[in-house]
Amino acid sequence: MQIRLGDHIFAEKSWANILLISFYQIKNNVLKYPGYIKFAKRAANKINKWRLKRNIQRNFLIYCSVVVGFLGGLAAIVLKYVVHVMEVLSEDIAAHLYYHLAFAFLPALGILLTVFYQHVINRDHIEKGIGRILINIKRNRSNIKINNVYAHLATSSLTVGFGGSSGLEAPIVCMGAALGSNTGKFFNLSPYEKTVLIAAGASAGIAAVFNSPIAGVLFSLEILIGEITIPTFIPLLIASATGVVVSKLLYSGQLFHLVTDGWSLNALPFYVVLGLFSGWISVYISKVAGKLEHGLFKKYNRYQRALAGGLILGLIIMIFPALFGEGYSHLQDIFNGNITTLKNETLFSSWLAQPLVMLLFIACIVLMKIIAAGITIGSGGNGGTFAPTMFTGAFLGLFVAFAANQTGLVHLNVSNFIAVGMAGALSGVMHAPLTAIFLIAEITGGYILFIPLMIVSAISYVISRMYHPYNMYWEELVHEQNIRPEQDFNMLDSISLNSIINKTFTAVNKAMPVAEFYQLLSKSTANIFAVLDEEGELDGVILMDQVRKQMFNQKPTAITVEDIMTPPPTIIDYYQPVSTVMEVFDAIDAWQLPVIRDGEFIGFISKSALLAQYRELIIKQHKETDLFARI
């Protein structure tokens, strides 16, 4: 007997299949019940009519940012709480087994469950990573499916809760972005307003989980929006503050506690060294994460990849237990100066009593964390590289301070270098120095370290930019999908090429006598003519500048159109982005170019028409972003 559920066919009836049938019945009959949809639509229509009638359009986005901030903060806290409970359970299981053998199979179990959820329950509709948010903003009018909220909640908690060595920040940002996008969609807001609410949801999530409202705002401005404007800043600030309030009410704890008396000038050269190391390790993180996250064991099916990757990850965690999960508990231990905790759970605890071996062990952790994170994500788990980057930077700072202190020539505050190392790694990997500085300052309470944070973050950022012009989120989008963070490119690509193509062209055959062409020319106002063959393919073009020379230098009856036509400077493909069309115009200094679609000539595109459309977009965007001048 076969059972069909959506796109899946089950061969026989078993307890597992009965559970799946029950889930699909709930999903289809309850979650998609038409009555709920109609009720939601009626409510949205009533609210929209009310706000338009009351002329409160200019303040409505601010009201929405409060709602999105509350929902984004709540989602972040729920995810952190669920993962915390699962991590405690996993560590308790591991503590009762010899040499923590649970580390060998718990990550594989979490990744397998994640892959199962994505494949069978979610049916691969989840959109992982911050890069997918950027694609939706640039190419999908800021529309993100609502299923990303519960899909990320389930999959990331399974992955990280069972020891997957990735972070929760990317899923939290994705959840907040989905909530913001669907709030905007619910109230029928414009793409720009939905973009602001996407950023507001992301800000609220980051602010809630780190208790850092300023860093939450800066993260969205530097990573998602790419520019800082007052009209955009206000909704993000309100959403971020709302997220922190929710966090305070439900989860009143600080992520890290830093005890410091400040920093000394004697440590300044070592902060410079840490900045250099941070820049180089940022390049390493970007390259390793980019390769591993694209997938492992691609020749095998998803479950085999999950099992193989999970087991490899488990073996790595058995050697380096600090790589289990996010690793924030180990970060707090080393913040407290309790470095000996690193040897309590490892197989090499007796060897780590030697300072040189401990230093080598710390260096291995610095290099292995991003490898463990890449294996986690590449084998099918869900998570991000935000937390692994912070973790790597913290242990890099520990490495520099520990190594310097072992010389006996200087005594450095280890906690200071751990905190500053986190900022350096984040600044280099994300290309977001402001986010890195304020995030570490807020979550550690270490505003007294502002100068070292600025120095290390700046050096790391400069070195990283030398090797990678774009951060790890944009690198793939720029090179593989031609999506750029620059606002000029975004506005140009939002223009439809079809809307600016002049399709009312005059076509001639190359065998036409020039005299006949001159008669046609006297009745036309065009500056460029297409020369087509019998099959409608482009043979060349005739430019008015060339025609004027021929009119006065040649006898019209002696030549044909073929003698005065020229090959076009270049040909525009109908499907290429408009931003590249503008680059072509600038490169060859032309004003009109032919457009080809599937090998067929369809018309000319004018640089002046493109600039006119671009100007209209600038005016429109200025009106949309000026929230306080709108009626």
Image: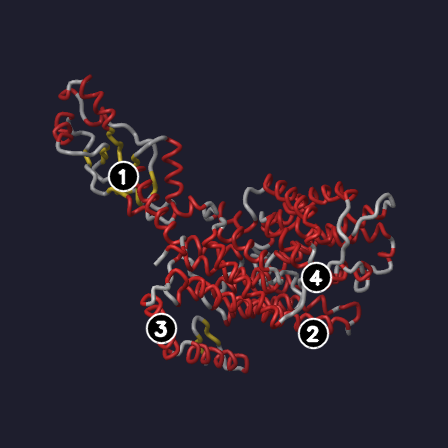
- Badge 3 marks a residue whose secondary structure is helix
Going from the N terminus, do you reach mark 3 or mark 4 first? 3
Task: Determine the CA span between mark 1 and mark 4.
Answer: 61 Å
Residue 518 placement, left or right of 581: left
Residue at which label 4 appears: 256
- Badge 4 marks a residue whose secondary structure is loop
Q: Quadrant of residue 187?
A: bottom left
Position above or below: 166 against 575: below
Residue 418 placement, left or right of 154: right
Residue at 47% x, 63% y is 65
Between circles 1 and 4, the one closer to the viewer is 4
Q: Mark number for residue 41?
A: 3
Going from the N terminus, do you reach mark 3 or mark 1 first? 3
Task: Determine the CA span between mark 3 and mark 4.
Answer: 44 Å
Residue at 79% x, 67% y is 99
Task: Determine the CA span between mark 3 and mark 1.
Answer: 44 Å
Residue type at tag 3 = Lys
Task: Determine the CA span between mark 2 and mark 3.
Answer: 42 Å
Between circles 2 and 3, the one closer to the viewer is 3
- Badge 1 marks a residue whose secondary structure is strand
- The residue lying toward the viewer, choosing from 476 and 494, is 494
Residue type at tag 1 = Phe
Q: Position of residue 540 (x, y in %)?
A: 27, 32
Residue at which label 1 appears: 604
Asked if marks 3 and 1 touch (Cβ < 8 Å), the reply is no
Going from the N terminus, do you reach mark 1 or mark 4 first? 4
Going from the N terminus, do you reach mark 4 or mark 2 first? 2
